[in-house]
Image (cartoon, helix red, strand yellow):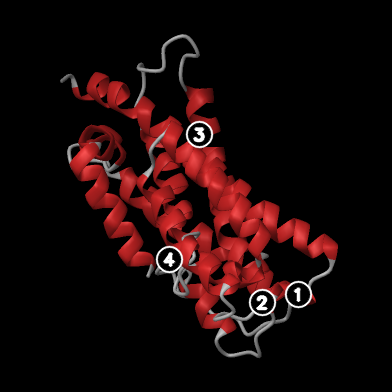
Amino acid sequence: MGLAILLGLLIFMALFHEATLESGAKVLGPNYLRAYGWASLIGIVLQVIVHEIGGLVVAKWYRLPLHFRPFGFGANASATLESIPRNPWVDAIMGFAGPITGTIFSLILAGIFLLVNNPDNFTDDSPLFLGMACVGFFYNLVTLIPIREFEGGWIAPAIAPQAWLLGLIAVGLVLTHEFNLVLLCVLSFGLPRLILIISGRAPRLDTIFTPRQHLIVNFSYFILVIVLAWLGTVTFDKLPDLVRDVMGD
């Protein structure tokens, strides 16, 4: 259902908002590697490892069986949680661990870029740190798409239907202001979950939560999703000028 909604929205945008779709679907081109240097390959691997370490730390805290599978997209959380009885709260915390850790790492990279560059002219030095921060923001946002194979799928059952409704409206409003393809995926795969819960075809696992746990999960998920989308878009918009300056074209 989520894939059908996503394809429908993409077809609609391709027909009526082609320019917006094209701008939102841009990714870092292969020529950017020359601007970043080969260190960018190490940076991308580090993004995945740091992301997975977050899950390992939480697993250690909850005394869960530890797994380290640095393949990204929730591999570590899935490997850990599949082997234990399901607990929606622990599932959600494990789901948040990697994206939050990865977001902090990306913010550190962006901070390093600001420190090593001239505040009045950001085009003096290599955009490596900002580029890797941008990759991290989008990577961690992708992992929050509410699909079972991603961390977002482990968080989603803990979110109340009221929060889904308000959160998806907020995501939709953000999309009308600044299009983001990954954020569109969050909306497309979140809508079916809301529909299934309202129709009674999916169990409500959030009913066992305390009010404090409700606040933590419901607000944290949508705030993190929207903030990552904004950070990814802002850093991506700054990269073309930096790359052209470094590459001389």
Does residue 179 appear left or right of residue 145 in this picture? Answer: left
Quick check: marks 2 and 1 in contact, CB under 8 Å?
Answer: yes
Decide which of tag 4 and tag 1 comes sooner along the chain: 4
Mark 3 residue type: Ala
Does residue 43 appear left or right of residue 56 in this picture? Answer: left
Mark 2 residue type: Arg
Rounded to the nearest angstrom, the CA distance separating label 3 from label 1 is: 39 Å
User: Residue under circle 1?
Assistant: 207
Q: Position of residue 67 (x, y in %)?
A: 54, 80
Decide which of tag 2 and tag 3 comes sooner along the chain: 3
> What residue lies at 52% left-to-right and 58% top-to-bottom?
50
Mark 1 residue type: Thr
Q: Residues within 10 Å of mark 3 (few under 14, many from 20)?
A: many
Look at the numbered disc 3 and give the secondary structure of its residue. helix
Q: Position of residue 84 (x, y in %)?
A: 63, 89
Q: In which quarter of the image is the N terminus?
A: bottom left
> What residue lies at 71% left-to-right and 72% top-to-bottom?
206
On screen, residue 40 above or below 46: above
